[in-house]
Image: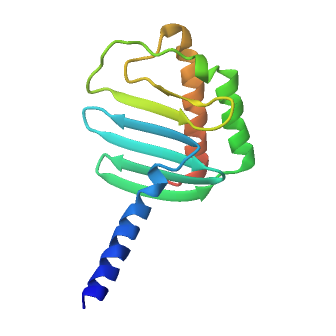
Amino acid sequence: MNRIIGILFAIIVLVSCNSQKVYSDFDISYSKSGGFAPVYENLLIKGNNAHYSFEGQGKKYKHDFKISNEDLKKLDQTLSQNNFRRIQEDRKKLYDNITISINVKRGPNEGSKTDASLIIPNFQSNWNNIIQAFQEVINNNVKKQ
């Protein structure tokens, strides 16, 4: 009996640990969260696999899809052309603001940026171009219900 309980416990632990893997094992992530009526939107990319989730406005949605090499190349080009690594964040504190965070864990654009404290005005158009590229990937691959 103890053996069966031990095996069941081990299975539960393994399953629960594996369910969070999608949120920690990624090459590129785009996250939008916060606001007065909180919204949480995530796009996580690992290789050609992508995981999208949205929660807010009374809706909850998850979608896994394959991202094309062309879309990945576009994202990398947009990050490079808009000097992702050189974008500077402001130090001002903002509250109840919807913030966007982008993390790149591979390639020449490796880095992490967020507009939680705003972006320095000189880099705002670069930041907007990068955000637009991620929104295009989401709009082209995710059919929201």
Determine the image quadrant of residue 129: top right
Determine the image quadrant of residue 70: top right
Q: Using the image, determine if residue 141 lies above or below residue 107.
A: below
- Residue 109 image offset from top left, x and y in percent: 64, 29
Residue lying at 45% horizontally and 44% vertically, measured from the top left: 42
- Residue 47 image offset from top left, x and y in percent: 65, 51
Q: Please name whichever residue, 31 or 4, is drawn nearer the observer in this view of the structure.
A: 4
Residue at the farthest bottom position: 1
Residue 97 lies left or right of residue 32; in this view the side is left
Residue lying at 42% horizontally and 12% vertically, measured from the top left: 90
Residue at the farthest front position: 2
Q: Please name whichever residue, 124 or 10, is drawn nearer the observer in this view of the structure.
A: 10
Q: Is residue 145 visible?
A: no
Q: Quadrant of the C terminus?
A: bottom left
Q: Using the image, determine if residue 4 lies above or below residue 24.
A: below
Q: Is residue 1 visible?
A: yes
- Residue 114 image offset from top left, x and y in percent: 45, 26
Residue lying at 30% horizontally and 76% vertically, measured from the top left: 9
